[in-house]
Image: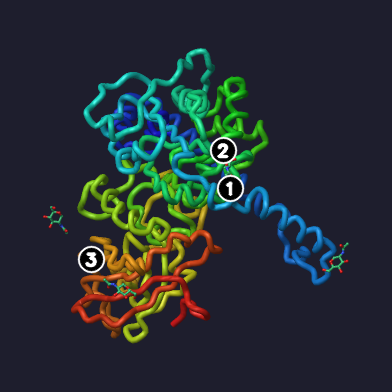
């Protein structure tokens, strides 16, 4: 969701957020706290009813359902369908004519008020020589000398004739929803995808391309991801691409949208934001959301660590709400932290944030690698099904909600002092052999106070550095999704743990 458009909404949930949020909260706090209570009550009530309904309704997927029978009358049909599918829609285009960055046009939703600060996030990822895009603002801003590092700026068309009747939201939602149409109307040539994002969204464009290449741009596609918050998804939609995480619309779909969007928007004056307006129009067009797990709305507060250290097995495409969450590396500014992430991103974008799990048998340690970001060492043996679950280092978007209100599984941060992870953050990464594509990334132990532990096994505090050896693997996502394997290696360097990460070998699995 667009931040600058939902000042009020945010203020209800996060009075401690950034500047504009706090300001809005102060001026509206009296009326808003009443509304807040009503809203919380309404949402909890809806949620309760919803949960009860789930419990009482018959199980949709009972065990007796014939998923597969040994004699399959549809077998021949399925085989034929599979063949035609691979040659047409989903199978991807011949590599000679594959989607490149020049086929993508970005539409970035921004507001003049926050521009000076937010433009720095865009500078992190946008490359004016290689990419096309437009920043859409509500009014003119002073043009600075850094404008050549940014996409061109345009002022959105007037939307005062559109009705807006949502009491919590802001009518800028209409302006932002129309960015797709306005970008389309610029009439750029050779466009396959329109990709929308906010001014506080950072894209990993190589991975965005990897995702888009899976789909046929000559057909209708609406690609993005949900909110982390179950309540947000209930309140807005489980079928909606959250705007801040970014979403992609194929050219023909944008063309179809342009023809109807203004009429469509008029039919939903009561909706809150820009992305729910978009979803309403997609529903009228009959186009469902194609969910891709690498787009991240990050509707959370606090520390993203748990989510970034256990990323789903999918290319890492975007991050959002960067002003709201803590810097992703400790003891540096938000921008410095994101800048550091660009080092592994350049070396091996496909592998960025990809988790691998292995064991240091003689020390009975569990090692979890989130390549290019952080390493965790746990005392004892934790199974992959535990380690691949994000630990709750972050807080719910709805302050009063707990882990039952996430749209995925999480695990608690362990209370046992012996099970507190030792965390090592990326300090640098290098290509060490350009022939083999071998890289070495170095991670340094975060010196957080570690509680006393009485277990006899060696303490991971004897390790100060972790070095990870990994070959670049640009074709990672052209294979079926599978977690990489990691192996603990002999180290010649003191206080250093050496780990190798790469494709699993024949028969290799994560076990002790
Ligand atoms: C289905 O496939 C089997 C072999 O796989 C073949 O013997 C059979 O004739 C096919 N049936 C039809 C209806 O095509
Ligand atoms: C590449 O794709 C574009 C757009 O789909 C199409 O117009 C063009 O003919 C294709 N070119 C080749 C060489 O296949
Ligand atoms: C944090 O950064 C400051 C300034 O760069 C430095 O002096 C300090 O040692 C750092 N603290 C830690 C724990 O790394
Ligand atoms: C790079 O790897 C190749 C193949 O293993 C090896 O022959 C070469 O010596 C390596 N180069 C460097 C600079 O280590």
Residue at 50 percent of width and 31 percent of height = 189
Q: What element carries label 3?
A: strand
Residue at 55 percent of width and 30 percent of height = 277
Q: Is residue 16 visible?
A: no
Q: Residues within 10 Å of mark 1 (few under 14, many from 20)?
A: many
Residue farthest to the top, as pictured: 161
Q: Can residue 11 be seen in this view?
A: yes
Nearer mark to the viewer, of 3 and 1: 1
| Residue tagged 2 | 250
| Residue tagged 3 | 444
Q: Earlier in the sequence, mark 3 or mark 1?
A: 1
Q: Where is residue 447 in the image (x, y as percent from the top left)?
A: 20, 65
| Residue tagged 1 | 215
Q: Position of residue 140 (x, y in %)?
A: 32, 19
The quarter of the picture showing ligand 2: top right
Q: Colour scheme of this structure image?
A: rainbow
Q: How crowded is mark 3: few (under 14 residues within 10 Å), some or many (20 or more)?
A: some
Mark 2 in CB contact with mark 1 (< 8 angstroms): yes
Residue at 29 percent of width and 63 percent of height = 431
Nearer mark to the viewer, of 2 and 3: 2
Above or below: residue 419 compared with residue 149? below
Q: Position of residue 119 (x, y in %)?
A: 30, 34
Quadrant containing the N terminus in the rendered view: top left
Q: Which of marks 2 and 1 is nearer the N terminus?
A: 1
Q: How crowded is mark 2: few (under 14 residues within 10 Å), some or many (20 or more)?
A: many
281 or 150: nearer the viewer = 150
- How far separated are the C-alphas under marks 3 and 1? 39 Å
Q: What element carries label 2?
A: strand
């Amino acid at each position: 969701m667009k931040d600058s458009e939902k000042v009020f909404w945010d203020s209800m949930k996060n009075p401690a957020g950034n500047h504009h949020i706090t300001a809005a909260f102060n001026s509206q706090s009296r009326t808003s706290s009443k509304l807040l209570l009503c809203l919380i009550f309404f949402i909890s009530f809806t949620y309760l009813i919803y949960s009860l309904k789930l419990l009482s309704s018959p199980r949709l997927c009972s065990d007796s359902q014939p998923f597969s029978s040994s004699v399959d009358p549809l077998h021949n049909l399925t085989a034929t369908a599979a063949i035609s599918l691979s040659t047409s829609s989903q199978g991807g285009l011949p590599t000679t004519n594959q989607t490149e960055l020049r086929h993508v046009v970005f539409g970035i939703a921004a507001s003049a008020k926050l521009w000076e600060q937010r433009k720095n996030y865009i500078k992190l990822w946008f490359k004016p020589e290689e990419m096309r895009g437009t920043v859409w603002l509500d009014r003119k801003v002073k043009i600075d000398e850094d404008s050549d590092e940014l996409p061109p700026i345009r002022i959105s068309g007037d939307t005062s004739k559109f009705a807006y009747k949502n009491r919590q939201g802001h009518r800028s939602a209409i302006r932002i929803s129309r960015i797709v149409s306005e970008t389309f109307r610029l009439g750029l040539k050779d466009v396959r995808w329109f990709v929308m994002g906010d001014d506080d969204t950072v894209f990993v464009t190589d991975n965005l391309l990897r995702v888009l290449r899976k789909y046929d741009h000559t057909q209708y596609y609406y690609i993005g991801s949900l909110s982390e918050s179950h309540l947000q998804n209930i309140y807005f939609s489980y079928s909606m691409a959250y705007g801040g995480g970014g979403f992609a619309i194929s050219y023909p779909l944008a063309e179809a949208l342009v023809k109807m969007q203004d009429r469509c928007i008029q039919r939903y004056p009561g909706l809150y934001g820009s992305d729910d307006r978009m979803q309403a129009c997609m529903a009228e067009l009959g186009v469902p959301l194609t969910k891709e797990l690498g787009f991240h709305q990050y509707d959370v507060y606090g520390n993203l660590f748990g989510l970034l250290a256990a990323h789903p097995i999918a290319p890492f495409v975007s991050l959002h709400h960067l002003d709201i969450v803590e810097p992703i590396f400790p003891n540096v500014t938000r921008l410095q932290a994101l800048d550091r992430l660009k080092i592994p991103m350049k070396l091996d974008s496909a592998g960025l944030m990809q988790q691998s799990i292995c064991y240091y048998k003689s020390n009975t340690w569990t090692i979890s690698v989130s390549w290019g970001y952080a390493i965790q060492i746990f005392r004892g043996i934790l199974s992959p099904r535990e380690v691949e679950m994000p630990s709750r280092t972050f807080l719910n978007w709805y302050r009063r909600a707990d882990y039952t209100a996430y749209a995925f599984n999480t695990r608690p941060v362990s209370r046992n002092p012996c099970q507190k992870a030792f965390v090592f953050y990326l300090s640098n990464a290098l290509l060490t052999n350009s022939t083999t594509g071998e890289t070495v990334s170095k991670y340094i132990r975060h010196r957080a106070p570690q509680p006393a532990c009485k277990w006899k096994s060696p303490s991971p505090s004897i390790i100060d550095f972790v070095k990870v050896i990994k070959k670049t693997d640009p074709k990672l996502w052209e294979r079926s999704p599978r977690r990489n394997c990691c192996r603990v290696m002999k180290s010649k360097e003191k206080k250093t743990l050496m780990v190798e990460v790469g494709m699993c070998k024949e028969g290799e699995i994560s076990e002790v």
